[in-house]
């Protein structure tokens, strides 16, 4: 199933069964925190010790 069809089905489900106010608040907070993390990383303020680094592959 392609992305547009999934989104259309999800929107149709939400129209028939809207989420509660508390669920909307939780979703908004999660999206806001994610956007904040992406913005901080994009601007270059993310601490170096929190960046993911590739580990070299060594045979065991």
Image (tube, rainbow, N blue to C red):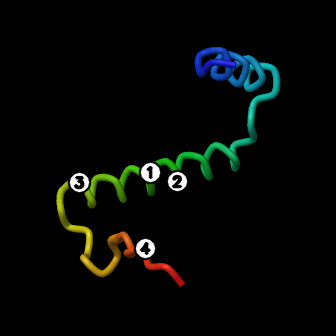
Q: Quadrant of residue 13?
A: top right
Name the residue rendered at 62%, 52% in the picture.
Answer: 26
Compared with residue 52, is residue 41 higher up or lower down, i.e. above or below? above
Secondary structure category for the residue under label 3 = helix
The quadrant of the rendering that contains the N terminus is top right
Q: Work out how far the residue at label 4 is from the one at label 2, CA to CA, in angstroms.
A: 38 Å
3D distance between C-alphas at marks 2 and 1? 5 Å
Residue at 60% across, 47% down: 27
Tell me the tag on residue 57: 4
Task: Kindly state the secondary structure of the residue where label 2 is placed.
Answer: helix
Q: Which residue is mark 3?
A: 42
Identify residue for label 2. 29
Between discs 4 and 1, the one toward the N terminus: 1
Of badges 4 and 1, nearer the viewer stands: 4
Mark with earlier residue (4, 2): 2
Give x and y (percent) for residue 21.
69, 43
Residue in front for this viewpoint, 35 or 5: 5
- Residue at image mark 1: 32
26 to the left or right of 33? right
From the image, state whether disc 4 or disc 2 is nearer to you: 4
Q: Secondary structure at mark 4?
A: loop
- Whichever of labels 3 and 2 marks the residue nearer the N terminus, that label is 2
Position of residue 14 in the picture relative to residue 3 (left or right): right
């Amino acid at each position: 199933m392609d992305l547009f069809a999934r989104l259309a089905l999800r929107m149709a489900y939400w129209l028939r069964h809207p989420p509660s106010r508390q669920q909307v608040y939780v979703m908004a907070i999660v999206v806001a925190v994610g956007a904040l993390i992406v913005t901080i990383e994009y601007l270059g303020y993310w601490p170096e010790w929190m960046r993911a680094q590739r580990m070299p592959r060594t045979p065991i």
